[in-house]
Image: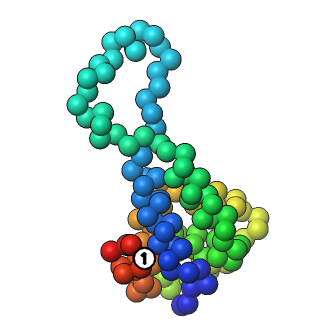
Amino acid sequence: MELETPLDTICRLIVRAREWDAQVPADESDDVEDEQTMSTDDPYDVMIDEKNDSVEEEILALLDDLAEDQLAEVLALAWIGSGTYDASDWEEALEEAGDKESDPAADQLMEMPMLAAYLESGLESFGLSCSGVGQID
């Protein structure tokens, strides 16, 4: 299997998706009573990496730059990495990912909670990895 999508693009997507997965939504309470009782001296607050719109925007820009067949390829890789399909079912996964009747591939990818892990696993299923690609080790 030879990918149409450049490996460095997939690897950049993995890095950004990893950042996206690590972020948590900000704790915004509209209840004044809750705000008064919440401690602002939580020593673990500094460890929380809140949602950053720029990471989401970069992922969306990466996906937007891909052609439809490349988006289908990335989605099929994620499905294989998640176990939805087996590597031997590549053609079937690719066909399903490119189906015009289903939700857009970019939307499906953005809704995957473990996108980075799924893409890495999908690449590994074909003996590919991001090791040595760009700044990724």
Residue projecting furthest to the bottom: 1
**What's the amino acid at mark 1?**
Gly
The local secondary structure at tag 1 comes to: loop
Name the residue located 55 percent from the left edge and 45 percent from the top edge: 53
| Residue identifier under label 1 | 134
78 or 56, which is in the foreground?
A: 56
Name the residue located 57 percent from the left edge and 57 percent from the top edge: 58
42 or 103, which is in the foreground?
A: 42
Q: Residues within 10 Å of mark 1 (few under 14, many from 20)?
A: few
In this view of the protein, can residue 136 be seen by the observer? yes
On the image, the x and y values in percent for residue 103 come to 70, 59
Residue projecting furthest to the left: 43
On the image, the x and y values in percent for residue 1 come to 54, 90
On the image, the x and y values in percent for residue 125 come to 42, 81
On the image, the x and y values in percent for residue 132 come to 36, 81
**As drawn, 68 above or below 46:** below
In this view of the protein, can residue 85 be seen by the observer? no
Name the residue located 76 percent from the left edge and 68 percent from the top edge: 100
